[in-house]
Amino acid sequence: MNITLRPNNLDAFWMPYTANRSFKASPRLLARAEGVFYYTPEGREVLDGTAGLWCVNAGHGRREIAEAIKAQADVMDFAPTFQMGHPIAFEAAARLAEFTPDGLDRIFFTNSGSESADTALKIALAYHRARGEGQRVRLVGRERGYHGCGFGGMSVGGIVANRRQFGAQLPFVDHLPHTHLPEKNRFARGEPEHGAHLADALEDLVKLHGDTIAAVIVEPVAGSTGVLVPPKGYLRRLRELCTRHGILLIFDEVITGFSRLGAGFAAEHFGVLPDIITMAKGLTNAAVPMGAVAVTREVYETVLEGSPGGIEFFHGYTYSGHPLAAAAAIASIRIHQEEDLAGRVRDLAPYWQEAAHSLRGAPFVTDIRDCGLIAGVELEPVKDRPTERGMRVLQRCFDDGLLVRVTGDIVALSPPLTIERRHVDRIFDTLDRALRKEA
Ligand code: PLP
């Protein structure tokens, strides 16, 4: 079978987060990838403006990763990590613990960002129970947050469309206000000036709920709802309030981790250390699904010591620490370290920022936001038809050789970190052309 051929039957695959009917009427297919490019089944080059789905941070087709996966597959395809172990899973955890911010060096493996979010929430609950504070069962997310699509992540998430189709949500969940203040921060470069005070909403929740809050989970930069960069001082304030009130702070770094902002993790970029970090995507450069949760030693030891003996944490996945994923993770982390991808981002970020903000004044652009190698370009929606303009721009860019992601009418850009200046120019020139055709 030639798997690069266009499939002649698109019916069987129920596509995730996709308008299946319109997609299948007019499919956009990607068949091959190399470096910062995808290729369609017809061989047309498409510049990857989104690193796949915020995940192929080290660029496509990394031989080191493919070879590591193959070598491991030849040695051992699978072994359980329940009551058993295999060396490469321990090795992957040790390498990851070196890469995560100092102090967060105990690693729980999952298979995705969604599983990482649910795992982190359960760790927080288990931690408080182990400390004799089992009344702390309340979980706090944030409006416009995305933490995947498990029941936990969905419930603490703050995307209305992801929740309203499903009546049952986790109980005991609250949401902080989002930090998007366009009237004050429009066209801000990097962290906006206004909005740190929005963290104080946690004080109000503490007044309401007393000592029943277990954890606060936020994305340091909210990606899925259109690149919302934290206002200056916001994350620090959230950290202080969590510490003051005995609440664990979880950073969901599924998109901000793995050098995206110019440091290994956003926690380092913003200089704010949470108690728990969730990650996935860039961990294996997306070559094999894998997620992870990094926790402080205190969290780990508390959960262990809170148990009378036997299994300390009744949670885990068949594929936690899967050998092929572990091999991919080790190879991916090595690339980040040896090629200093974070340093690359720091060097390129000013150029990226300038290029992104050059779209100010282009038709229908109402705001531009950026952080590290992420940018969000917000467009004025077509009257009474939200998302229509966004989808049209996505299609025009794709036809013109650029993959972008749209969330509603916001174009989100997050290229592989191996991108060069000429690719940056091409991204924003193509988007500019697509917008001018809208006018
Ligand atoms: N958390 C964040 C911040 C994400 O951006 C995503 C996916 O985009 C997830 C969690 C879910 O990850 P996954 O799709 O691997 O379950």
Image: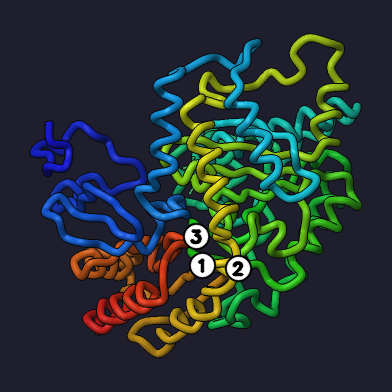
Is 129 above or below relative to 299? above
Does 362 sit left or right of 44 as displayed?
right
Q: Are marks 2 and 1 in contact (CB under 8 Å)?
A: no
Query: Disc 2 marks which residue?
Result: 229
In this rendering, the label closer to the viewer, 3 or 2: 2
Question: Which residue type carries mark 3?
Answer: Thr
Local packing at callout 2 (Cα closer than 10 Å; few below 14, some 14-19, many 20+) is: many
Does 20 sit left or right of 339 as displayed?
left
Q: How far across and how far down the image is residue 19, in percent?
A: 27, 49
Local packing at callout 1 (Cα closer than 10 Å; few below 14, some 14-19, many 20+) is: many
Does 245 sit left or right of 343 as displayed?
right
- Can residue 174 be seen here? The reply is no
In this rendering, the label closer to the viewer, 3 or 1: 1
Quarter of image, res 49: bottom left
Query: Disc 3 marks which residue?
Result: 225
Q: Are marks 3 and 1 in contact (CB under 8 Å)?
A: no
Query: Disc 1 marks which residue?
Result: 373
Cα–Cα gap, marks 3 and 2: 11 Å
- Can residue 205 be seen here? The reply is yes
- Answer with mark 2 or mark 1, whichever residue precedes in sequence: 2
- Answer with mark 3 or mark 1, whichever residue precedes in sequence: 3
Quarter of image, res 132: top right
